[in-house]
Amino acid sequence: MMARRTQAAVTALTDAITLNPNLAIAHVILGAAYGFGGMPEDGLHHLAIAERLSPRDSTQQPGVLTVTGMCHFVAQRYVDAASFEHRAVQLRPHFGAAWRTLAAAAGMAGDLDEATHALSEAKRLHPTLSVQWVEKYYPMVREQDRAAYIEGLRTAGLE
Protein backbone atom coordinates (compact mmCIF):
# COMPACT_ATOMS: atom_id res chain seq x y z
CA MET A 1 0.00 0.00 0.00
CA MET A 2 2.71 2.47 0.96
CA ALA A 3 4.47 1.74 -2.35
CA ARG A 4 1.27 2.67 -4.26
CA ARG A 5 0.68 -0.96 -5.22
CA THR A 6 -3.02 -1.05 -4.39
CA GLN A 7 -3.92 -4.34 -6.05
CA ALA A 8 -1.12 -6.24 -4.33
CA ALA A 9 -2.14 -4.72 -0.98
CA VAL A 10 -5.82 -5.51 -1.51
CA THR A 11 -5.00 -9.09 -2.45
CA ALA A 12 -2.77 -9.66 0.58
CA LEU A 13 -5.21 -8.04 2.99
CA THR A 14 -8.19 -9.89 1.53
CA ASP A 15 -6.26 -13.13 2.01
CA ALA A 16 -5.58 -12.18 5.64
CA ILE A 17 -9.26 -11.42 6.21
CA THR A 18 -10.24 -14.72 4.59
CA LEU A 19 -7.99 -16.50 7.10
CA ASN A 20 -9.30 -14.42 10.02
CA PRO A 21 -12.48 -12.43 9.26
CA ASN A 22 -12.35 -10.90 12.75
CA LEU A 23 -8.91 -9.32 12.32
CA ALA A 24 -9.95 -5.69 12.76
CA ILE A 25 -6.55 -4.21 11.93
CA ALA A 26 -6.58 -5.96 8.54
CA HIS A 27 -9.87 -4.22 7.79
CA VAL A 28 -8.34 -0.88 8.82
CA ILE A 29 -5.35 -1.34 6.55
CA LEU A 30 -7.56 -2.60 3.73
CA GLY A 31 -9.67 0.53 4.21
CA ALA A 32 -6.51 2.59 3.86
CA ALA A 33 -5.41 0.68 0.76
CA TYR A 34 -8.78 1.33 -0.89
CA GLY A 35 -8.77 4.98 0.15
CA PHE A 36 -5.23 5.65 -1.04
CA GLY A 37 -6.09 3.71 -4.19
CA GLY A 38 -8.95 6.07 -5.05
CA MET A 39 -11.82 3.88 -3.83
CA PRO A 40 -12.94 5.75 -0.71
CA GLU A 41 -16.36 4.14 -0.35
CA ASP A 42 -14.78 0.67 -0.29
CA GLY A 43 -12.34 2.01 2.27
CA LEU A 44 -15.10 3.38 4.48
CA HIS A 45 -16.89 0.01 4.25
CA HIS A 46 -13.89 -1.81 5.72
CA LEU A 47 -13.34 0.86 8.37
CA ALA A 48 -16.94 0.35 9.50
CA ILE A 49 -16.29 -3.40 9.77
CA ALA A 50 -13.16 -2.73 11.84
CA GLU A 51 -15.12 -0.43 14.16
CA ARG A 52 -17.82 -3.07 14.57
CA LEU A 53 -15.24 -5.77 15.32
CA SER A 54 -13.25 -3.70 17.80
CA PRO A 55 -15.31 -0.72 18.99
CA ARG A 56 -13.36 -0.05 22.18
CA ASP A 57 -9.80 -0.38 20.92
CA SER A 58 -8.33 2.96 21.96
CA THR A 59 -4.99 2.15 20.33
CA GLN A 60 -6.68 1.67 16.96
CA GLN A 61 -9.17 4.56 17.08
CA PRO A 62 -6.85 7.42 16.01
CA GLY A 63 -5.74 5.35 13.01
CA VAL A 64 -9.31 4.57 12.07
CA LEU A 65 -10.20 8.26 12.35
CA THR A 66 -7.31 9.42 10.18
CA VAL A 67 -7.94 6.79 7.51
CA THR A 68 -11.62 7.73 7.58
CA GLY A 69 -10.61 11.36 7.10
CA MET A 70 -8.34 10.43 4.22
CA CYS A 71 -11.17 8.48 2.55
CA HIS A 72 -13.45 11.51 2.87
CA PHE A 73 -10.64 13.66 1.43
CA VAL A 74 -10.35 11.41 -1.62
CA ALA A 75 -14.15 11.59 -1.98
CA GLN A 76 -13.79 15.40 -1.95
CA ARG A 77 -15.74 15.77 1.29
CA TYR A 78 -13.17 18.11 2.78
CA VAL A 79 -15.20 19.37 5.76
CA ASP A 80 -15.90 15.78 6.82
CA ALA A 81 -12.23 14.89 6.28
CA ALA A 82 -11.10 17.76 8.49
CA SER A 83 -13.57 16.76 11.21
CA PHE A 84 -12.24 13.18 11.38
CA GLU A 85 -8.61 14.35 11.31
CA HIS A 86 -9.32 16.86 14.08
CA ARG A 87 -10.69 14.04 16.24
CA ALA A 88 -7.61 11.92 15.45
CA VAL A 89 -5.16 14.60 16.61
CA GLN A 90 -7.20 15.22 19.75
CA LEU A 91 -6.71 11.55 20.66
CA ARG A 92 -3.08 11.37 19.51
CA PRO A 93 -1.46 14.85 19.44
CA HIS A 94 1.81 13.55 17.95
CA PHE A 95 0.11 11.92 14.94
CA GLY A 96 1.91 13.55 12.03
CA ALA A 97 -0.14 11.92 9.29
CA ALA A 98 -3.37 13.17 10.86
CA TRP A 99 -2.01 16.72 11.24
CA ARG A 100 -0.86 16.65 7.61
CA THR A 101 -4.22 15.47 6.28
CA LEU A 102 -6.02 17.92 8.57
CA ALA A 103 -3.96 20.73 7.02
CA ALA A 104 -4.79 19.57 3.48
CA ALA A 105 -8.48 19.02 4.21
CA ALA A 106 -8.92 22.31 6.06
CA GLY A 107 -7.07 24.08 3.25
CA MET A 108 -9.41 22.60 0.66
CA ALA A 109 -12.44 23.40 2.86
CA GLY A 110 -11.34 27.04 3.12
CA ASP A 111 -10.64 26.99 6.87
CA LEU A 112 -7.31 28.81 6.74
CA ASP A 113 -6.87 29.15 10.51
CA GLU A 114 -7.25 25.41 11.03
CA ALA A 115 -5.12 24.66 7.96
CA THR A 116 -2.19 26.84 9.02
CA HIS A 117 -2.29 25.56 12.59
CA ALA A 118 -2.39 21.94 11.40
CA LEU A 119 0.46 22.52 8.96
CA SER A 120 2.52 24.08 11.74
CA GLU A 121 2.01 20.95 13.84
CA ALA A 122 2.71 18.66 10.87
CA LYS A 123 5.97 20.50 10.15
CA ARG A 124 6.97 20.42 13.82
CA LEU A 125 6.64 16.62 13.70
CA HIS A 126 8.01 16.28 10.16
CA PRO A 127 10.42 19.21 9.55
CA THR A 128 11.32 18.04 6.03
CA LEU A 129 7.70 17.95 4.85
CA SER A 130 7.49 19.43 1.36
CA VAL A 131 5.50 19.19 -1.83
CA GLN A 132 8.31 17.05 -3.22
CA TRP A 133 8.01 14.66 -0.26
CA VAL A 134 4.26 14.27 -0.86
CA GLU A 135 4.83 13.61 -4.57
CA LYS A 136 7.50 11.03 -3.88
CA TYR A 137 6.34 9.25 -0.72
CA TYR A 138 2.69 9.90 0.10
CA PRO A 139 0.79 6.74 -0.89
CA MET A 140 -2.15 8.34 -2.74
CA VAL A 141 -2.15 6.49 -6.04
CA ARG A 142 -4.19 8.76 -8.28
CA GLU A 143 -2.47 11.89 -9.46
CA GLN A 144 -5.65 13.98 -9.07
CA ASP A 145 -5.94 12.97 -5.39
CA ARG A 146 -2.30 13.90 -4.69
CA ALA A 147 -2.80 17.17 -6.59
CA ALA A 148 -5.78 18.07 -4.38
CA TYR A 149 -3.80 17.06 -1.27
CA ILE A 150 -0.91 19.27 -2.35
CA GLU A 151 -3.28 22.12 -3.18
CA GLY A 152 -4.73 21.92 0.32
CA LEU A 153 -1.24 21.87 1.86
CA ARG A 154 -0.15 24.82 -0.28
CA THR A 155 -3.24 26.71 0.82
CA ALA A 156 -2.13 26.00 4.38
CA GLY A 157 1.29 27.44 3.54
CA LEU A 158 3.47 24.49 2.46
CA GLU A 159 6.17 25.31 -0.03
Image (cartoon, rainbow, N blue to C red):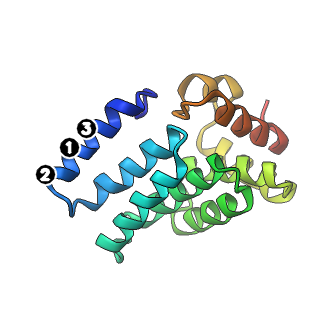
- Which image quarter: residue 93? bottom right
Residue count near mark 1 (Cα–Cα under 10 Å), binned few <14, some 14–19, many ≥20 = few
Contact check, label 1 and label 2, Cβ < 8 Å: yes
Q: Position of residue 129 (x, y in %)?
A: 65, 33
Residue count near mark 2 (Cα–Cα under 10 Å), binned few <14, some 14–19, many ≥20 = few
What's the amino acid at mark 2?
Leu
State the residue lying farthest toward the bottom.
56
Contact check, label 3 and label 2, Cβ < 8 Å: no
Residue 15, numbered label: 1
State the residue lying farthest toward the left.
19
- Which image quarter: residue 14? top left
Residue 12, numbered label: 3
What's the amino acid at mark 3?
Ala
Contact check, label 3 and label 1, Cβ < 8 Å: yes
Is label 1 in a helix, a strand or a loop?
A: helix
Is 127 or 155 nearer to us in this picture? 155
The relative height of residue 69 versus residue 49 in the rendered view (above or below) is: above
Q: Which part of the image, by quadrant, shows the N terminus?
A: top left
Write the residue at 52% across / 54% down.
41
Is label 2 in a helix, a strand or a loop?
A: helix
Is 114 or 76 nearer to us in this picture? 76
Asked if residue 24 shows in the view, the reply is: yes
- Which image quarter: residue 128? top right
Q: CA distance from mark 3 to mark 2?
A: 11 Å
Is 46 or 61 nearer to us in this picture? 46
Is label 3 in a helix, a strand or a loop?
A: helix
**Which residue carries the number 2 mark?**
19
Q: Position of residue 127 (x, y in %)?
A: 64, 35
Q: Position of residue 37 (x, y in %)?
A: 50, 37
